[in-house]
Structures are given as structure tokens and as C-alpha cells.
Image (cartoon, coloured by chain):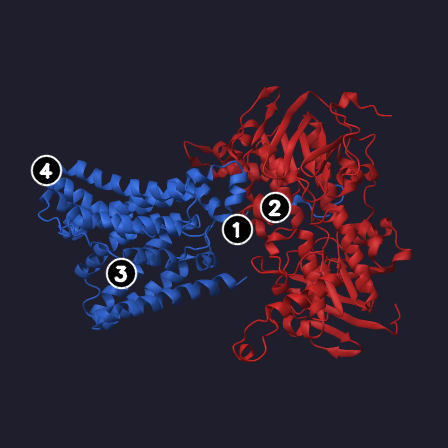
Amino acid sequence: MSTTNTAKSGDVQIGSRGTTWREIVGRQEFGVALILLVIVVFLSFYTNTFLTSTNIFNIMRAFSWIALSTFGQVMVIVTAGIDLSVGSVMGLSGLASAMLLAEGIPVPIAVIGGLATGFLVGFANGLMITKGRLPPFIATLGTLLMARGLCYGLTGGWPVRELPESFRYLGQHDIPIGTVGVPLPLIFTLVFAAISSIFLTRTIWGYRIYAVGGSETATRLSGINTDSVKIMVYSLCGLLTAIGGVLMTARLGVAAPTAADGYELDVIAAAVVGGTSLMGGEGTILGGLIGALVMQVLRNGLVLVGISAYWLQAVQGLVIVTAIMLDQLRKRRP
Amino acid sequence: MPEKQDTLLVMKEISKSFPGVQALKDVDFEVAAGEVVALIGENGAGKSTLMKILCGAYRKDSGKILLNGKEIEIENPHHAQELNISIIYQEFNLTPNQSAAANIFITREPRERGVGRILNFVDRRRMEKEAQMYLERVGARISSSTLIQDLSVAAQQMVEVAKALAVDARIIIMDEPTSALGEEEVDTLFGIIESLKKQGIAVIFITHRLEEVFHIADRVVVLRDGRFVGGLPIQEATTEAIIHLMVGRELVADMFQKKEAEIGAPLLEVRGLTGGDQVKDVSFTLHKGEILGFAGLVGAGRTETARLIFGADRKESGEILFEGTPVDIHSPVDAVRSGIGMVPEDRGLQGLILMMAVSENIVLPTLGEHASFGWVQQGAIRETAQEYVDKLSIRTPYLEQKAMFLSGGNQQKVVLAKWLASDPKILIMDEPTRGIDVGAKAEVHALMSKLAASGIGIIMISSELPEILGMSDRVLVMSEGRVAAILDRKVATQERIIAYASGELDNEIILDGVSKGEVS
């Protein structure tokens, strides 16, 4: 057929599958991993307390719920969307479980109730964005307020206390592995990180999520139902956030209506610091995981170094913009 | 070529390289005041790079630029503008939410007098009045207070030209100005270029359409692989000579020529299709092995008709029969399931996901077939992708290359590949060869012939009449949302199509069904 071409398709060669040093440096997680490493090395030498198993697991425990929600947020942002409601959803789903427990409902059902709450809010977000044609920012701003309002309304502002031991176990128990006790929430986080990552990179749904973020029009015109992809993504974000919310409530042993207030910013920051592009189409679970870790290590490190907690947000803001600028520099390199 | 007295601009031995590519090598170029130079060459020949150097978007590596005999160094786009050099890009540089006047005076808005001057208040009345003058100079019959988004593509282009005049441009570069225009609008544009010429302005005109060169240019300059390969006064130029220079080889004579294919049973019947503002009561039949060309002016409703059939937009009424049975197509999902594929007008935005790999783009409509229980089979994807990369000779260094790094022609082949992989019965192709070079164009046409021969029915929307005439078995001409005529290839002529498209003729000859194809 190609009577006019000098170049032949024989030029096509399959790139080698082996991982080279260049590929590692080129990966989007590299920058944020480097930042994490620098902070960790600094804290290890500067303080005696940072590199103790107690402190490390404290960090890991507190970072679990942020990380779980970040996995969902990464998926949402990859489709070029945003979910502002995650903080409220985390609070509401934990509260839902706690209220069911207070009614004497068995732990497994109460947990499922909490997860279903998060899933449903996410599903509602998805419906409003696709069928209701609301911009994601507006739809999830609405549910941010509605979910938080429900927390206050349902409790009259009072926290739900005295949660059963078997529920608190989920958040407070350590699983002995070798000589150390690994917090259960951390194990959940790693398991869901693996599941989410495989989902995003190995299944057709994952492919479709990236495709929608790359070009929604082209994806739709390829015969893919982009609405259902988006509804799925927001529902999953709600579900993963609810898992975080239930674990957080179990850890704290109390469900306050103010719980997880403002966490949406931590979650979005973790996703973005981890290399997820707000323009859509780019982002990984591993990046989100490291991003969440950076934010938590910072929080912990400042306290250990003896800087007042009042400075925390200023430092976090600085780290966010620095991380993104480094990422932009990486991308500009040919 | 000897330098003439009135030579305005001379570029000498210009070289430019990018990492891994020598984009330009010792290119000479010149243009005189009041001269129209057509700059042509295949994609990647270096036309755009040369022009970007001229308008300050790129810096040259070496070489000299002389303006009015004085050597100059063009620092940046702003500097180029101060030197009275303007460029009109294929994708216009206009802010759609502002008025034509605001765009014409962008960065130089006239300020009010008195206190308003200190506060930088824009003198809107004066701005609109002066903008109107420039619009009149290019013969645009639009009000300068109209928002850009409310203007047609052709009118937007006139605003761009007016904008260039407003900065007192002496050299205007037009990068494929006709690619988004219908035949009639092209004539208007040529009228504008004629008048620019009379005003002593030099026009550099980049195009892929050779017939335009003979219409408008005084001289043709051809680049190939980053080198100057020839310049001819238009009187000495012939199509064959230009193509020979462009591709450096003789091109097959039967370009734009569909090969004979057996026309089979009706595949798609569309009856009374209506939707939106632009499609009214469209009916036609597409047969197996047939290429049905959709001709008409821009805005006649051709793309909109295609989108309705494909389910991309919602139809108000009408019936679609697929192989004799009515089908309900509510979304592209349904269309793809029925065996319809669509190669859209804008491959960058609608056809491809530019940031994704070539292989991923190719399997996008058939992801389900490359997975088992939702698990993507990487091996199967690579196999399919490799198969079509070979079949269509898509030039890509490797399958994982992001689609954005391919040339226009190869990108278009990737879009085709993704539909061929879905084994369609019907292909809708909207401007399948727009903006791709001559060689790739011939390949796409050959491929279309082959697909038709294998029994696929093709709807081909095209604004290029030679393409319509050469490739179509029948030509459906649309005018203002309606079918003005369906012409058998035996009776379709350029003049007749234009007459129907512009509404001069209406429904005199309707030939539906190939067998009925006799006309006096």
C-alpha cells in the first residue's frame, strides 16, 4: 500500500521492559520520594526521637486515613475532577458507624453502614456531576457542606462516645510482625494501596479512568460511557474515604461531629504533591501514598524539632508549591 | 534568484536544530513588498519552524535576517510585532469572550481622556469605531462589538487580519488559513489577500492545498526535510513540478482516486434525520463498499449530521436503519456496538488522547476484547497495536510513544487504526486528510479504497472538492442543513456541487440508490 514512503514500519521496535536508572528518575514519583528522603534523613540526624519504632508507627497510624482517602482522590483528579467533600465524608461515615454502634447494632453491620454512607455520598457526587451537569467543584462543595451539616444536625453537636472494644480494635490494635507491632490501620492502608494501584493500572476500568482524564471527548467518541466512569470514580472515592473515616473513629474511640474537618485540603495536597496532575490524565496511587506520607512526616517532624505547631500550615504550603515546581521542572526536560 | 529593488525581507542560510532533529539547514527565503509567497512542503519540512523564527517564537541557530536591507535580530514575538511582522496561526489567537474590537486592539486599547486616562479606562467607543475601520479594510461585514465566540470561523479569521493591519503589519504570515474554510469563504479570503497586496503588504501563505497556490501566489517556495529545494514564479510552476519538489519523487498519478469496488446491499438508511439548528430532514442510503461523499459549505450541517448518526448529539426526529432493521442510537456506545466508527474532524481533541500511548489509543474502542474479566491483557494489546502499526505503516519509534509526538498524518492513521481494530461495518470520516501532507494523504486514500473494497460503507465529509470528486461513489451535497442533492460520480462536477452547496440549485436531480444512476 505504501508506495510513497521511504521509512518502513520495520523501524518500529519494542522498547525494553527492563527498568533503567533513567526510567526511575523520569517517573513522576521520583521527585516526591526524594523530598521525603531528605526530610527523613534530616529528622533522623537532627532528633533522637524520630527514628524510633513508636514514633514511626504513630506517624503511620495517623497518616492511614489521609492516605486511604488520597487513593480515591487520585482517581478523581486523574479524570480531571476534584472531590472537596472527602473531609466531611470521612467525618460522616465514622459518625454513621458510631451511631449505629450506639444503637447496639453489631460491629460488622455498623462498619458496613459507615462504608455505605461514604459510598452513597460519592455516588451522589457522581450523579450530580454527570446527570446534573454540575462542575465537580460545585457538586462536591455542596456535599462538603451537606455532609458536615448532617454531622452536626444528627448529633446536636455532641460527640458519640463509649464505642465498643471490638470496634476500637480496628484502629488501635497492633499486629505483631517479628519483634514489632504493626498498627492495623497501616496494614489496611497498604492492602488498599495495592488493590487501588492494580485496579488503576491493570484493569479496563483503570484504563478508562486515564482515558477520560486525557480527553473526555475522544473517550466518549470511542464508544466509552464516560458518565459511568465518572460515577464509579466518585463512588470509589467516597468508599475509600469512608474506610479511612471508620478507621479514624475506631482509633480515636469517639466520633466528634467536627472530626476530619478540613482534611480535604490535606488529601488534595497529598495527591498533588504525589504527582497527580489537576489537568487530568496523570497520577499514581504510589505517588499519592508518598505524598500523604510527606504531609504527615512534616507534621510530626516540626513538633519533634521543637517548632510551634502554629507554623505547620506555613511549612506545608511551602512544601506543596516546592514539590509542584520541582515536578514542572522534571516535565520540562526533554 | 537576484535580489530585487523592493525586496522587503531576506532570510539567509537560516539553520535551526532541536534535540535530535535538524529542523532547518541553510534555508534562504525572501519576500518583496506587495508579493504573495506560497510556502509549501510536507509536514515536518520546516515551514512552521522557519515562520516561527520570523515571528520571534523561535531563535535561529545561525544565518542572517535582513529587513529593508538592514540586518536584524528578532528577539521575541513582541519584537517581531514592533518590526511590523504579524503571524496568523491556524488556531487563532483570539479571546472568544471578548469583542472583535477588544481583540484587534489587544494590549493597545485606546484610553479615555482626562481622569479616565490616569485610571487606564478603556475608551470603548473610540476603540470600536477604529476597529470598525480595520474590519472594513478587510471587507468584513461584522460589527466590531460582536463577541468572537459569536462569529464564524471565517469571520474570526478576518478579525485576525484586521488585527494585523491594526499593528501596521508590513509582512503577514498566514499558517494554513484555508484549512477551516469552505470554498466560498476561501474566495473571500483571497479577495482580502489581493487587497493586502495592493496596499503593499507582503503575504507569506503556508498551505497544503496546491490548487490555492495557483489562485493566489506570485511565487512558490518549497521546503523539504528542512532544506530549501526550489522557488518558482507562479507562471513557471505546474502541479507536477511542485509535487515533485515537495516529495522528491514522482507521485502516483491516481491520487484522489477510489479504486473500483462492488457496491452491495444497503447498509445504513437514514430517514428524516433532524436535530439541533443545523440538521433538517436529512435522508440517504449508504451501501456496502460505497464511499458517500458529504460536500457543502462550512456550517451546512455535515459534521452535525454525522454526530447525530453516531449518537454524539441527540436527534429530535428521524429513523436510522442498519442493514434493514431500525436501530436506536442514543450514544456513541450504541453506535460502536452497532458497528459504526467515527474519525472526527479534530483528531487532537476528539480523535486521540494525546497524552496516552499509541498502543492504548489503538485499543480504546475495543478495550473489552483485550481483557478477561476486566483484567487488561498487555500482550493482546501490544499484538493488536503492532498489527495495525504494520498494516497502516504508522511511523512511531515504539508502541508506547505518546500520540502527541507523532506527525499529523501518523496521528490520523492511529485514529483509523483504532476503528479498524473494532472491525466496523460503517466508518464516518470527517475531513480525513485535513492538515496532513501529500504522501500521508495518498496513503489514507489508498486505505479508504481498500476498506470499501472489503465491504465497509464509508461516509466521507470533506471540504476539498478534488477529494470529494475523486474518492466518492456518490456525492451528497448539503446546504443550510438540508440535502440539496445526491449526485452519482458520473454526473458530479465541481461546478454542480458548488451550485448546490451555495443554494443556487435545489433538488433538481436527486439520485438515491446507485442503480438509478442515470441522468440526462
- The residue wearing badge 4 is A104
Q: Tell me residue B191's x, y (percent).
A: 80, 56
Q: Give the SS element for disc 3.
A: helix
Q: Colour of chain B?
A: red
Q: Residue at x 40, y 49 (%)?
A: A136
Q: Tell me residue A64's x, y (percent).
A: 25, 52
Q: Residue at x 33, y 64 (%)?
A: A37
Instruction: Verify CB contact (< 8 Å) between mark 2 and mark 3.
Output: no
Q: How many marks?
A: 4
Is disc 3 on the same chain as disc 2?
no
Is disc 4 on the same chain as disc 3?
yes
Q: Is residue A184 visible?
A: no
Sequence-earlier tag: 3 or 4 = 4
Estimate the spatial distance between the alpha carbons at disc 1 and disc 2, rounded to whole Å: 13 Å
Residue B31: image quadrant is bottom right
Taking depth in this image into account, of B284 and B274 the one nearest to the observer is B274
Q: Which chain is blue?
A: A
Q: Tag 1: Cα neighbours inside 10 Å, few (<14), some, or many (≥20)?
A: some
- The residue wearing badge 1 is B355
Instruction: Verify CB contact (< 8 Å) between mark 1 and mark 2.
Output: no
**Which chain is indicated by disc 1?**
B
Q: Tag 4: Cα neighbours inside 10 Å, few (<14), some, or many (≥20)?
A: few
Instruction: Verify CB contact (< 8 Å) between mark 1 and mark 3.
Output: no
Determine which of the numbered discs, if any, sits on residue A296 in the image: 3
* Amino acid type of the residue tagged 4 in the rendering: Gly
Is disc 3 on the same chain as disc 1?
no
Please name which of the two marks, 4 or 1, marks the residue nearer to the observer: 4
- The residue wearing badge 2 is B347
Q: Tag 2: Cα neighbours inside 10 Å, few (<14), some, or many (≥20)?
A: many
Q: Tell me residue B83's x, y (percent).
A: 71, 74
